[in-house]
Image (cartoon, helix red, strand yellow):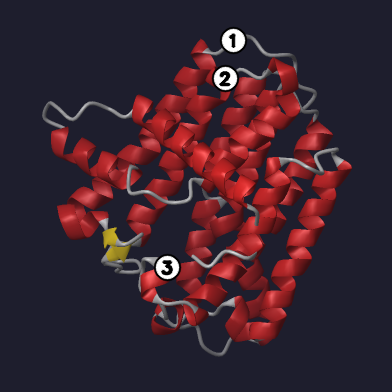
Amino acid sequence: MGTDFKSGLNERVAHIEDTLKAFLPAENGYAKTVIEAMNYSLLAGGKRLRPMMMLEAYRLFAGTEADEQVVKPFMTAMEMIHTYSLVHDDLPAMDNDEYRRGRKTTHAVYGAGMATLAGDGLLNLAYETAVAGAIKGKELSSYDGDNKNRYLAALEILTTKAGIYGMVGGQCADICAENATGIPEDEMKDTLHYIDENKTGALIEASLMVGAVLGGASASQVRMMEQVGSNVGIAFQIQDDILDITSTAEVLGKPIGSDEKNGKSTYVSLYGMDNAKAKVKELSDEAVDILDNLGFKDSFLHELFQYLIYREK
């Protein structure tokens, strides 16, 4: 990746950080502690990939009509949903991780009870933020999907992909599959695909789809973006599984070997390292081809997907 891409990436991360800060709740009143824990969690750094993908998809479809005030509440909501899932993932009852991105996890600082509430608060605040954006946003063109109102269509995607038919469903299957024994390999592979598609893929799909819907895309274009998100999400998770074995805690900013420690089946454990690496490339190439067919060949989004394949943390 060239320096132009890296500087573009850094600029976008900084832009998203500023956007998030503008929506943060004030740390006062009787709920002060939970709000502090929520803000601590949200501002813990990270790649900000989901709001970035949403913004880029929005810009591509909106073109000269782009008005970021339309998409900013949804970008913020997406990062709040992603953050809540990490806060809950790190809890003692789940993955029991003490560090994330090189600093103490929320439960390690605020305790498990307050961290649980912080996750709950972030999920609810995500919906409050997106709904407020939909109410206050400028009028958009009619959508040719099931829901003619683009804001409502975007809200439906956001909420569905975050729930039992998306990320939460994937997390459920992930927990059920831990230390599972005696399951036929084909069934385990199907389960793993469902987990990767939903636990990781659903929010990436939603990010691209919401950006496209708000930007003026047609329903068929939104379906294409959903497929792009599915491919990128699964490839991203496989790369995560690879790094959990090949990287170091210093580079990743979190403990390595946690998949093996927690008895998790991964793409690497079921297919082998070489096949895992080949699958990342295959899925990523297919996603890029779809993007090219949409006419976005030289877009930042195109480069971002390439960057994700070769990331080291």
User: Mark 3 belongs to which amino acid?
Assistant: Leu
Up/down of 205 relative to 259, above or below: above
Residue 215 in the image, given as x and y percentages of width and height: 69, 25
Labels 2 & 1 near each other (Cβ < 8 A): yes
Residue at 65% in and 86% down: 272
Q: Quadrant of the N terminus?
A: bottom right
Quadrant in the rendering for residue 220: top right
Q: Residue at x 42, y 51 (%)?
A: 46
Name the residue at 62% across, 29% down. Answer: 154
Q: Which residue is mark 3?
A: 252
Kindly indicate the quadrant of the structure image that contains residue 30: top left
Determine the CA span between mark 2 and mark 1: 7 Å
Q: Which residue is mark 1?
A: 138
Residue extending farthest to the bottom is: 182
**Residue 233 against residue 39 in the figure, above or below:** below
Q: Residue at x 49, y 53 (%)?
A: 168
Disc ID at residue 70: 2
Estimate the x, y position of residue 123 in percent, counting from the top left. 39, 40
